[in-house]
Amino acid sequence: MFAKASEAKWEEVSNFYKVTFLEGGQYLTAFYNPSGEFESLARNISTAMLPLALQKDLQGKLQNAWITDSFELYGKNGTEYYVTVENANEKTLYRSNSTNWSIYKRIQK
């Protein structure tokens, strides 16, 4: 599936096998189930790479907060986007596979 991958680093994470590697000039992370079947593929992206509707919706969530992480995940559910927004008191992970964000996880600092 990733014939030109290099710099592969494997680890076991929550009953999945995770491999991070370089292919086509970008670092990717793939996840496989215990049977060795492909589950999903992730890559870090800048918020400028998000669909325009998600960029616009994200702006309303940034009052007194900043983005610390954003990535794209492709798997059985199609393409999903995740963005972590932090402020002094909490960290919120948003998820979307359409035009709006929903809260996936919130952590108090």
Image (cartoon, rainbow, N blue to C red):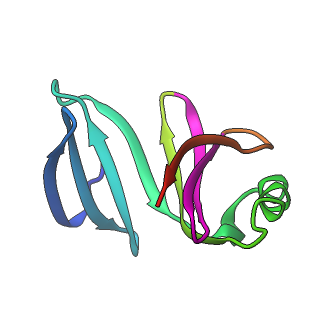
78 displayed left or right of 36: right
Asked if 61 appears above or below 106 in the picture, the reply is below
For image coordinates 26% across by 59% down, the residue present is 20
How many numbered circles are shown?
0
Q: Which quarter of the figure has residue 56?
A: bottom right
46 displayed left or right of 58: left
Query: Does the magenta run of residues contain 2?
Result: no
Query: Does the magenta run of residues contain 92?
Result: yes
For image coordinates 32% across by 48% down, the residue present is 30
Q: Nearer the viewer, residue 40 or 67?
A: 67
Q: Is any atom of residue 84 visible in this view?
A: yes
Q: Nearer the viewer, residue 91 or 81?
A: 91
- Residue span colored magenta: 77-96
Q: Position of residue 84 (x, y in %)?
A: 56, 59
30 displayed left or right of 107: left
For image coordinates 49% across by 51% down, the residue present is 107
10 displayed left or right of 5: left
For image coordinates 43% across by 52% down, the residue present is 42
Q: Is any atom of residue 4 visible in this view?
A: no
Q: Looking at the figure, which quarter contains the N terminus?
A: top left
Q: Which quarter of the figure has residue 88?
A: bottom right
